[in-house]
Amino acid sequence: MLPLMQLTKDAESIVIAGHVRPDGDCIGSCLGMYNYLKKLVPGKKVDLYLEEVPKAFSFLKCSEEVKHTSEAKGRYDLFLALDCGSIDRLGSLESLFLQAKTTVCIDHHISNTEYAQYNHVENHASSTGEVLFGIFDTELIDEAVAECLYLAIVHDTGVFKHSNTSKRTMEIAGALLEKGVSSSKVIDDSFYKKTYVQNQLLGRCLLESILLMDGKVIFSSVSKKMMELYGAVSSDLDGIIDQLRVTEGIEVAILLKEERPQQYKVSMRSNGKVDVCKICCMFGGGGHVMAAGCSMNGSVHDVINNLSVQIADQLSAKQEI
């Protein structure tokens, strides 16, 4: 068991950070830890760094206290890396991590490289939010902490509908609701509610999506020009890949986001027959069996061709069994 209480009490300065382009689980987990430590070790210096906190998550307590990664400096006694599978996923905070006296990684990704001094990785858990619930003293989980953890779980389970949702997940969700969390508020405000720009991007991606491999694969792409046209940020693409995934007959959904010319951020989702984590790991990424990502170079055509070969190999292997 991770000695979180002892580690935090021994440290005079603590930093919490998540992965680049943080999602709901990352943000909810980081803010959950931040609010929890304010109760566990009051008076200690605790800083939280994230690239961005989307407006949809601004109702979480202390979201306005999150520091931008560009502000990170100094040497901390304790670095807590949450929901981050490898050191490079810390982005610009990697140097801060390497300078810290003690480093901890708390995660649930099966592709985690165990890069910290203390690694607490539960790859059977639905989310890092679920992992944190098991680590925290339940007596210190108040409504604010519970709301953060509930949001983390909601986002990585797709509102409890993904296959990573277990009996344990639902039991934890129930325990968090007993702390006073409003399920409808968290789910509607952070998951379903969309801005006009988000709906426009979703519409474009669905309209311009392409079916491959006899309708087993669907992909869509978002160019920098499109992002600039709508004045969009990365978080505005949340949910698009999941909408592509639920298209009838689809085994794998792919969403490409152009980061710079000839470089794409790849998001992949599977409906069960394809291990997309295995594919993304081949290209330097990672994630889960049914949800993973990576970065790839080349044209859209090049990227999709390379991914399609790996998908076809797995589907062929399944048919031969």
Image (spheres, helix red, strand yellow):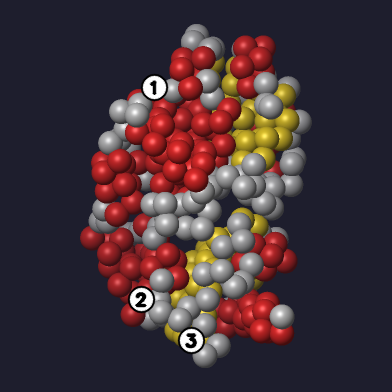
Which disc, if any, is residue 206? 2
Which disc, if any, is residue 215? 3
- Closer to the chain start, of discs 2 and 3, is 2
Residue shown at 53% from the left, 74% from the top: 252
Furthest toward the front, the residue is 167
- Closer to the chain start, of discs 1 and 2, is 1
Residue type, label 2: Leu
Q: Is residue 9 left or right of residue 226?
A: right
- Front residue (pair 234, 190): 190
- Give the CA distance from mark 1 to mark 3: 47 Å
Residue shown at 40% from the left, 76% from the top: 247
Look at mark 1 in the image and give the residue it sits on.
142
* Mark 1 in CB contact with mark 3 (< 8 angstroms): no
- Locate the N terminus and report the quarter of the image it occupies: top right
From the viewer's perspective, is residue 229 above or below residue 304? above
Residue shown at 55% from the left, 61% from the top: 291
- Locate the C terminus and report the quarter of the image it occupies: bottom right
- The secondary element bearing badge 3 is classed as loop
- The secondary element bearing badge 1 is classed as loop
- The secondary element bearing badge 2 is classed as helix
Q: Quadrant of residue 4?
A: top right
Q: Position of residue 259 (x, y in %)?
A: 52, 63
From the viewer's perspective, is residue 141 above or below residue 208? above
Q: Quadrant of residue 62?
A: top left
Residue type, label 1: Asp
Q: Position of residue 219 (x, y in %)?
A: 48, 77
Residue type, label 3: Gly
Q: Nearer the viewer, mark 1 or mark 2?
A: 1
- The reply to whether residue 232 is visible in this rendering is yes
- Closer to the chain start, of discs 1 and 3, is 1
Residue shown at 41% from the left, 39% from the top: 173
